[in-house]
Amino acid sequence: MNSPVPFWVVIPAAGIGQRMQADRPKQYLPLKGKALIEHTLDCFLQHPDLRGLTVCLAENDAWWPQLSCAGDTRIQRCIGGQERADSVLNGLSALLEQGAQAEDWVLVHDAARPNLARSDLDKLLQALADDPVGGLLAVPVRDTLKQVDANGRVTNTPDRSQFWQAYTPQMFRLGALQQALSAALAAGSSITDEASAMEWAGQAPRLVGGRADNIKVTRPEDLDWLAR
């Protein structure tokens, strides 16, 4: 039996998902009788080792209060920032106010990634439980990659065996992640995910192979696929 790995969660959910061209932020689009974000939260809320969870929302978010999970005492709401990294930093600060410690594990997960399997979550927790840095779920690139120039002409075909797609959750010590994000933003670095902040700080996050169906909803066809 796997030993417990207590963890906290931050869900950045302040974006509006313009590519979905919907009447609401994509995390609130309906999927199998619930809002997409409710499916995202379920995997964590059903886990016995969850200590607490913070959802980072837009200040004028009118959709969240309508969800049944909004009243769950394990979920705290905080105001998100302009960029993902700003939202995550706000979420980390909110967790510290809840009683989280700098050495605690925190998982950051995309609000629009509702198909996280419990087996993948457990795999990540167990694989990184004693890791000195932390890491993230990822999937090896399957298709041939092409590098192009400014005119859309192919300039190179890199070796795909060297490339992985970064997924979430991404799992790091709270204090280390907070410090890396703050320093990278202060330096004006482009931070696209938590792992990139840790890389900027000189760390080498570990990749943990996960399921390819842990997709992020970015286009209407993604939601159609999940609804099947």
Image (cartoon, helix red, strand yellow):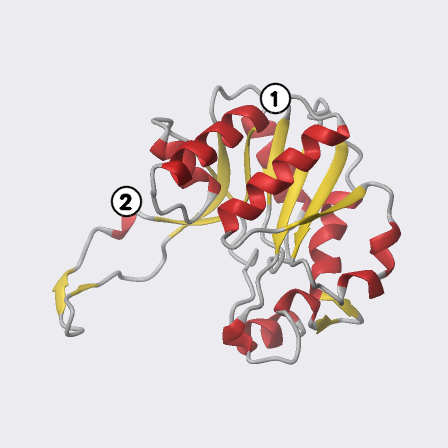
In this orientation, which residue lies closer to the viewer: 25 or 171? 25
In this orientation, which residue lies closer to the viewer: 81 or 100? 81
The answer to whether 57 is drawn above or below residue 150 in the figure is: above
Residue 174 seen in render = yes
Q: Position of residue 133 (x, y in %)?
A: 47, 24
Residue that numbered label 2 is attached to: 162
Q: Residues within 10 Å of mark 1 (few under 14, many from 20)?
A: some
- Label count reads 2
Label 1: element kind: loop
> Left or right: where does residue 199 sit relative to residue 112?
left
Residue at point 65% right, 80% down? Answer: 23
Q: CA distance from mark 1 to mark 2?
A: 33 Å
Residue that numbered label 1 is attached to: 102
Q: Quadrant of the C terminus?
A: bottom right
The reply to whether dot 1 and dot 2 touch (C-beta < 8 Å) is no
Of the numbered discs 1 and 2, the one sitting upstream in the chain is 1
Residue at point 88% right, 52% down? Answer: 71
Image quadrant where residue 2 sits: top right
Residue at point 46% right, 36% down? Answer: 181
Q: Position of residue 59 (x, y in %)?
A: 67, 58
